[in-house]
Image (tube, helix red, strand yellow):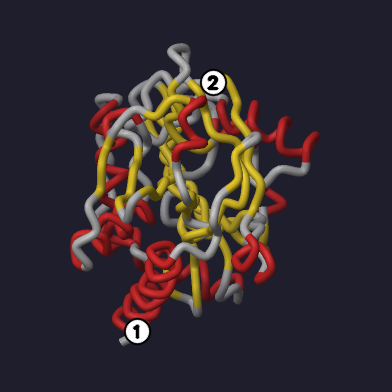
Amino acid sequence: MRGDYFLLNNTFMPTNQFDDELECGTVVYEVLRVINGVPLFFGDHFQRLENSCMLIEENIDIEVGVLFQNLLGLVKKNQITDGNVMVRFVFNNNKHNVIIYFIPHSYPSEKEYSEGVKVDFLNAERNNPEAKIEQGIKELASGTLKDTGLYEVFLVDRDGFVTEGSRSNFFLIKANKLYSTPLNKVLKGITLSKVLDLAKHYKNEVVFDMIGKDEFGDYESAFITGTSPKILPVAQVGQYKFNVNHPILRRLMKHYDEMIAADIALNKE
């Protein structure tokens, strides 16, 4: 946890008074990136929070405007204008807590955006991929990443298909088309949604299909999407190497950064 304060049900509390028991129960969460004091793409994150709660048959009773103001208040209270914020809805015995706090973050370096990152495969799958609830995948993947120095791992299901990253989504490129996993098989990330918007705008066809682990060699380029990495080129997945300077990839990166700038400008007003 970063900062001197966290929010518990609309009340600021010193971080040294945080009790782990507050997070006991079923946890629905979102991680938002704050840039220049603005929670990026907040409306999209709130909608996904509502959807995740609906999928586990729980309700949230905080209004979108209240949560947004709470986030702005947390930014001001901690005097942290750039970083990642965790929003957690914890459900336990027909009660729930809303807990918000800054978390440590790690953003890709300029070299990684330029040269791409290395990824490998991990045999694991989520029980409820469409809901952002804690399922143990992140902890399993974190051990692998720590031991290997990889940036990310792509999850491989019991049938040998690659679904998503442990903390990201991914796209592949071949013959000027984008390829990705069917949306009902993954947690649909906010950055993924923005890439789909950009692809539609620039008339890049997107093919949703289950892609086998052994089929990755058929593709020209690959990239990760996520809150912290934004759009990040992948240089290698397992034994397969990719073109990190594919024109479609570089164009998406440029226009996504423009979307970020526009969202910050809008919410700064």
| Residue placed most toward the observer, 69 or 103 | 103
| Residue placed most toward the observer, 82 or 117 | 117
Q: Amino acid at mark 1?
A: Ala
Q: Quadrant of residue 182?
A: top left
Q: Residue furthest bottom?
A: 269
The x and y percentages for residue 127 are: 41, 18
Q: Which mark is residue 265?
A: 1
| Residue placed most toward the observer, 17 or 86 | 86
Q: Residues within 10 Å of mark 1 (few under 14, many from 20)?
A: few
The CA distance from mark 2 to mark 1 is 40 Å
| Residue placed most toward the observer, 172 or 21 | 172
The residue that label 2 is drawn on is: 124
Q: Earlier in the sequence, mark 2 or mark 1?
A: 2
Q: Judge whether residue 41 can be spotted in this image.
A: yes
Residue sitting at 47 percent across and 60 percent down?
231
Q: Determine the secondary structure under disc 2.
A: loop
Q: Closer to the camera: disc 2 or disc 1?
A: 2
Q: Judge whether residue 3 can be spotted in this image.
A: no
Q: Residue furthest top?
A: 158
Q: Determine the secondary structure under disc 1.
A: helix
130 w.r.t. 103: above or below: above
Residues at discs 2 and 1 in contact (Cβ within 8 Å): no
The x and y percentages for residue 199 are: 26, 60
